Amino acid sequence: MINNIKIDPEFENKIPPLTEIELKQLEENILNDGIVINPLIIWNGILIDGHNRYRIIEKYPQITYTVHEKDFPDRFSAIAWICKNQLGRRNLTLEQKKYLIGKQYEAEKLTITNINGINQHTNEVGGHFDHQPKHEKTRERIAKEHNVSDSYVRRAEHFAKGVDIAEESVPGIRQEILTGKIKPTDKEITAITQATPSERPEIIKSLSQEKRKNSRIENERIRKIVEKFEHPDLEKTPEDLLCELEDALKTLIFRWDNCISIHKENFEICKDKIDELANMGIEYLQKIKGGY
């Protein structure tokens, strides 16, 4: 049975990969249990959930497992389900969450268009999403599902498209962006999507955090490259400002928590310097509160 299951790269790419430690722990748990507790989820013989479990089963064919078949009207519905499933199950980076919400929105628009044969993606009008309120726009509903703003969903779609285009130009860059190793701004994502295929590799490679950290000249060069690209659909609104500031703040909190977690043993040693950095941040935020 396992040999009859097909892997679709587009489906698999929507699933954030486990870390090496997480994958090792999953394998140990399965071997200790002697069974894969959660079923592999398939659609028309294609795996849509359980790719890590699938690899372990391939490695240990004696392991007992089960398969559950789901029914979708088209592959876009399957992609939307994958994204929602991952958003509800895993600890994700902010970038992974943004990417999945963007891909869910993109897929749901495509499946509704596909089902109805016309461009009706802004409203839930039938098919796989019949259980949703018909008056509610897709973007608004997804925003409510994930407790984000309507503007966030719009920007998430733009972000996801940019990440995919970047991956086509520089394979492997998607994982660096989604794990937070590289943090492009909205304008840099726009530059990637609007640039010609020949221009994209230089823009993408210039986003290296190491280059940014060590070179003001590099930062200025990036700014000049991206400033000529403007996305007409990303007009500057008060909601956009708040969305970007909230995203930046959450990124700061996430990265500080992550760094402190990884370097726990050095925290007390560096406490005085950490306090200095924290005070720099507090002073800046107090300045913003005072009216910039």
Image (tube, rainbow, N blue to C red):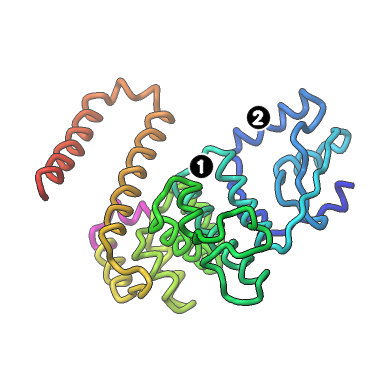
Question: Which segment did they paint magenta?
Answer: 208-218
- State the separation of the CA atoms marked 2 and 1: 18 Å
- Residue visible at 53% across and 64% down in the picture: 164
Asked if the magenta segment contains residue 256, the reply would be no
Q: Which of 253 and 113 is in front in this view?
A: 113
Instruction: Give residue 218's position: percent from left, percent from top.
Output: 29, 62
Instruction: Give residue 185's position: percent from left, percent from top.
Output: 35, 59
Q: Mark 2: which secondary structure?
A: helix
Label located before the other in sequence (2 or 1): 2
Instruction: Give residue 279's position: percent from left, percent from top.
Output: 17, 33
Which residue is identified by label 1?
A: 92
In the rendering, which numbered label is found on residue 25?
2
Instruction: Give residue 199's position: percent from left, percent from top.
Output: 43, 76
- Residue visible at 41% across and 60% down in the picture: 155
| Left or right relative to 80: residue 271 | left
In the rendering, which numbered label is found on residue 204?
none
The answer to whether residue 203 is above or below residue 182 is: below
| Left or right relative to 87: residue 230 | left
- Residue visible at 72% across and 32% down in the picture: 27
- Residue visible at 70% across and 42% down in the picture: 52
Q: In which quarter of the image is residue 274?
A: top left
